[in-house]
Amino acid sequence: MTPELMEQGARLRRRHEAREAGLQGSGDRGASYGRVVRPGEVDTAHGAILYLEDITVSFDGFRALNRLSLSISAGELRCIIGPNGAGKTTMMDVITGKTRPDEGKAWFGSTIDLLRLRESEIAQIGIGRKFQKPTVYEQLTVFENLELALKADRRVRASMFSRLGGEQLDRIGEVLALIHLKDHAQRTAGNLSHGQKQWLEIGMLLMQDPKLLLLDEPVAGMTDEETERTAELFLSLEGSHSLVVVEHDMKFIGELTQGGRNGKRVTVLHEGSVLAEGTLADVQANEKVVEVYLGR
Ligand SMILES: Nc1ncnc2c1ncn2[C@@H]1O[C@H](COP(=O)(O)OP(=O)(O)OP(=O)(O)O)[C@@H](O)[C@H]1O
């Protein structure tokens, strides 16, 4: 066989395997990098886990997102701030496939074209989203909520009535410790405080082992102590997960940016695009940011 034929065969096989994995992006982008992404794997060899380029979303002619571009590195904890109506929720809706943009690109890692996937597929490939209001199963215990989340993960492939294996029990134990609910495992979720319910929901997301977590106003309604513990939790996830945190609570943003890795970036959205990006000190010193948001 000639080298050309061998190369052609290898190319076809790579394309076929990528198609089988159901995770290939548009065109030959996956194949052109010469890497095949297995199911559940995100290719972050180029550094970015999320890449948005010139995303535009219009509602009846009004541009909720206006050529928004944003890049999040693997393992990064990025804070997103901005006034009401800036487009923060719409941006999350685009990433999770709830809203289709009119224009632009959205990549998860370097090979997964998010705009080609359905909302349910995006949840399966490792993008977890936490909405502002906690949505836990109030009648079930904390443990049962985490167990359900584990079994909702298709990769676990357990039936609702099968018994948990040792590895799964360990995983639930780990997550219970992370979310500060180890001593509350047998409590009914409905009896938890608001903050504890928020942590439980974050725990349910973690059970599905997401690579990227999108967190929309996670500390709204929390006490100061709960807010501090939530900052600790997010900082403990930094590195092993990528986190995008949308918040109005600047004290919380301060706690997140001061702890953990150095040089954390804050992005300010305004009128559907990035107004400023940099360290918290940078954006706090930015006159435009003070004018449209922080000075209000
Ligand atoms: N489905 C929709 N139909 C019409 N307009 C919408 C729709 N969704 C969002 N908008 C508008 O798009 C703009 C951006 O809204 P979005 O909710 O993304 O802002 P936000 O930054 O999340 O605001 P907040 O901080 O208040 O949550 C707003 O002007 C909003 O009214």
Image (spheres, rainbow, N blue to C red):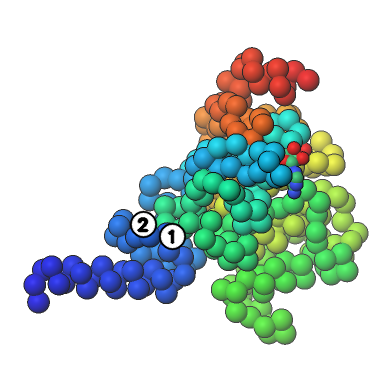
Q: Are marks 1 and 2 in contact (CB under 8 Å)?
A: yes
Residue 201 is at least partly visible in this image: yes
Residue at far right of view: 191
**What residue is at 67 percent from the left and 74 percent from the top?**
151
- Please give the label number shown on residue 29: 2
Figure quadrant, ligand 1: top right
Specify whether 48 is left or right of 266.
left
- Image quadrant in which you'd find residue 148: bottom right
- The alpha-carbon separation of the residues under discs 1 and 2 comes to 6 Å
**What residue is at 52 percent from the left and 31 percent from the top?**
262
**What residue is at 81 percent from the left and 36 percent from the top?**
224
- Please give the label number shown on residue 56: none
- Image quadrant in which you'd find residue 266: top right
Residue at far left of view: 2
**What residue is at 77 percent from the left and 67 percent from the top?**
145
Residue 264 location, x and y as percent?
55, 32
* Foreground residue among 199 and 114: 114
On the image, numbered disc 1 is attached to which residue? 25
Image quadrant where one finds the C terminus = top right
Residue 62 location, x and y as percent?
69, 39
**Residue type indicated by callout 1:** Gly
Specify whether 270 is left or right of 126.
right
* Foreground residue among 213 and 194: 213
Residue 63 location, x and y as percent?
66, 38
Whether residue 180 is situated above or below residue 118 in the rendered picture: above
* Foreground residue among 157 and 291: 291
Q: Is the shortest distance between ligand 1 and the CB of mark 1 under 8 Å?
A: no
User: What is the crowding at mark 1: few (fewer than 14 residues within 10 Å), some, or many (at least 20)?
Assistant: many
